[in-house]
Structure formats: structure tokens, C-alpha cells
Image: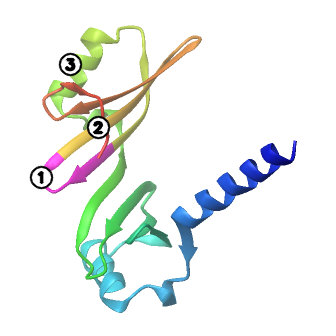
Amino acid sequence: MKRKLLLAIGLLFSGLTYAQDIPAKDVPLEVRNSLKKAFPNATKVEWEMKGDLYNADFDIGRRDHEVWLDRKGAILKHKKEIRAKELPVAVSNVIKKNYAGYRIEDVDRFQEGKTVLYKVELKKIGEEKKIVLDSKGSVVDRIL
């Protein structure tokens, strides 16, 4: 019993050390300025440290965004919530063809460098699927 309790506590603390909320004042000025320059309309900005990267979670309008920046303020990855109608035609066509009967519940667009992927949550009665597709509609097995 003690082992299980110690294991559970250890897992809890290891998860807490990976992503740690930090106040904006503790984020380097060049990182904060980079975010402001790239996303001047960002609101409700919350900062975390994930490994050696700064993670900003924020809203623009009613859309959720998440950005990973290095210590110099370079944006390495951007996740943005989008509407289903904003999916590329090739992606929409693959979903219509291969996932008939499902409705699109949620879509996130991930960009890292020039690579763009779409994570799509699909639902139909009693079933849920999450798929990741590239801009051409090919299903991939990873997310950026």
C-alpha cells in the first residue's frame, strides 16, 4: 500500500515539474514582446514553462491559441482553434469520404515552421475519433 501511495505522489510531482505556471513578470521581456508583436490582440494571456520553452495560452476574439517560444522569443510552434469551414478543401473532402456519418466537433491547427497539421475531433452517436491530417488530407500519426 505504501509503495502505491509513494508511486502516486512521485507521479504527481513529476507532472508538476514538467509544466509550471509562471507570472508574466517572470517571463523575459523579449519573450513577452515577441508575443505582443506577433499577436497584438491577444487577451487572457497565461504563461507556463514547459521544459526550457515558454508556453503562452491566450485568446484572440473567441478563439483559443497556444504558442511555444524559446528564451530569445522565437516562436517555435503555434496551435490555433479554427472552425470546420476553415479546413483546407482537401482535408474536408477526406473527412467527408472516409468518415461519413461523423460530425466535426473540434478542430485545432498546428504550425511548426512551414509544417501545418490539423487535429480533428469527430463524433457520431456512441463514438468519438481524433485524427490528425496534413494540409493535403493525408492522415498522419503524430501532432507537432
Q: Earlier in the sequence, mark 1 or mark 3?
A: 3
Label 1's element? loop
Q: CA distance from mark 1 to mark 3?
A: 22 Å
Q: Which mark is residue 93?
A: 3
The magenta-colored residue range is 109-115
In screen coordinates, is 85 left or right of 59?
left
Measured along the vertical axis of the image, is residue 139 above or below residue 85? above
Measured along the vertical axis of the image, is residue 16 above or below residue 5? below
Q: Residue at x 72, y 49 (%)?
A: 7
Point out residue 69 in the picture as x, y percentages from the top left corner.
31, 71
Point out residue 2 in the picture as x, y percentages from the top left corner.
86, 48
Give the labeled residue for mark 1: 114
| Total numbered labels | 3
Give the labeled residue for mark 2: 118
Question: Given this view, does label 3 or label 2 mark the residue nearer the observer?
Answer: 2
In screen coordinates, is 47 left or right of 11?
left
Q: Give the amino acid type for the residue marked by disc 3 in the picture.
A: Asn
